[in-house]
């Protein structure tokens, strides 16, 4: 259990550190995409400020997410966000930054060096990075599969996911990829109690910013190695429970 709290602390530190990013000297447009996780939940969920959404999906060569996982991610966005002018994915590869294991700060620097899409008048932009190597926060008993670290940015540790799922009898890689991608994006949509206000009491007191329903996509174990493998053992991707969906709907989502 000790390692579990380490992972939770890592997430909290990440969330609390993201305001430091606003110190850089990029344009105002870019600054709008360098805020804390959860602050753009309403902009992403509703069509009030942005009627379309683009995902800039960048992966390290050799660590492209499966087409199934990308399709599942788009389906998740279409189900929960109100974007009448559409959701698109722009995908490309970059060479390995060669810095694994990655610290959260390194992940942020990689984004700043490679990200090209920021919010414009009516379109909100999201950065999704699929890393080689692993998180620096991994321990012998717990591995980090992904992290949401800014209001429109998340990283998926694709190599870690592939290592965990290789050699399984059925092809569980797309299931685990889909689980971690949608879990991290759930944080960016303000779950749980992270920008989309609780409509009922379901935040996990022991794992803040997570749902206390153990079958919900926003259960804390969905982003840690052993826990996520347990959650997908039935061969299906965990879904948001009714309480998490209610929080999103109350904040402009579907
Ligand atoms: Zn989480
Ligand atoms: Zn939930």
Image (cartoon, rainbow, N blue to C red):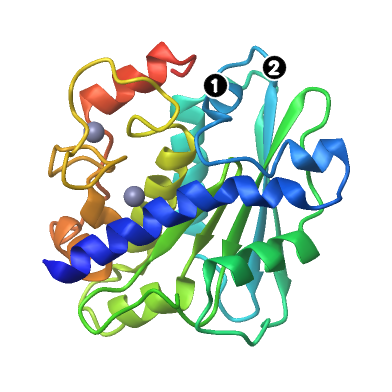
Q: Residue at 47% across / 55% down in the picture?
A: 14
Q: Does ligand 2 reach within 8 Å of label 1's beta carbon? A: no
Q: Which residue is mark 2?
A: 49
Q: Residue 246, can we see it?
A: yes
Q: Which residue is mark 1?
A: 42
Please provide percent x and percent y for residue 114.
Answer: 78, 64
**Crowd rating for badge 2 (residues with CA inside 10 Å; few <14, some 14–19, many 20+):** some
Please state if 119 lies on the left or on the right of 66 as rendered: right
Disc 2 is placed on an element classified as: loop
Question: In what element is the residue under mark 1?
Answer: helix
Please tell me in which quadrant of the rendered image residue 235 appears: bottom left
Q: Are marks 2 and 1 in contact (CB under 8 Å)?
A: yes
Q: Quadrant of residue 62?
A: bottom right
Q: Nearer the viewer, residue 194 or 169?
A: 194
Give me the residue at 39% from left, 55% from top: 11
Q: Quarter holding the N terminus?
A: bottom left
Label 2 to label 1: alpha-carbon separation:
9 Å
Q: Position of residue 94 (x, y in %)?
A: 73, 74
Is 15 left, or right, of 46 in this rendering? Answer: left
Q: Residue 115, image x and y in percent?
A: 76, 57
Residue at 17 percent of width and 39 percent of height: 205
Q: Quadrant of ligand 2?
A: top left
The quadrant of the picture occupied by the C terminus is: top left
């Amino acid at each position: 259990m000790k390692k579990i709290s380490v992972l939770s602390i890592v997430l909290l530190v990440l969330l609390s550190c993201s305001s430091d990013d606003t110190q850089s000297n990029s344009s105002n447009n870019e600054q709008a995409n360098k805020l804390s996780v959860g602050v753009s939940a309403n902009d992403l969920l509703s069509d009030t400020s942005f009627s379309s959404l683009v995902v800039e999906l960048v992966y390290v060569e050799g660590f492209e997410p499966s087409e199934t996982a990308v399709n599942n991610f788009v389906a998740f966005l279409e189900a929960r966000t109100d974007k009448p002018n559409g959701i698109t994915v722009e995908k490309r590869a970059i060479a390995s930054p060669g810095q694994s294991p990655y610290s959260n700060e390194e992940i942020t620097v990689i984004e700043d060096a490679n990200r090209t899409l920021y919010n414009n008048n009516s379109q909100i932009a999201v950065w999704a990075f699929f890393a080689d190597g692993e998180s620096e926060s991994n321990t012998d008993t717990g591995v980090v599969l992904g992290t949401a670290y800014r209001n429109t940015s998340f990283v998926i540790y694709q190599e870690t996911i592939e290592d965990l799922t290789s050699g399984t009898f059925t092809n569980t890689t797309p299931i685990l990829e889909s689980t971690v991608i949608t879990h991290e994006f759930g944080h960016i949509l303000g779950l749980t109690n992270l920008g989309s206000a609780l409509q009922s009491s379901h935040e996990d007191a022991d794992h803040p910013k997570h749902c206390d329903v153990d079958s919900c996509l926003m259960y804390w174990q969905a982003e840690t190695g052993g826990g996520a493998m347990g959650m997908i053992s039935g061969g299906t991707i965990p879904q948001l429970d009714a309480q998490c969906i209610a929080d999103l709907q109350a904040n402009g989502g579907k």
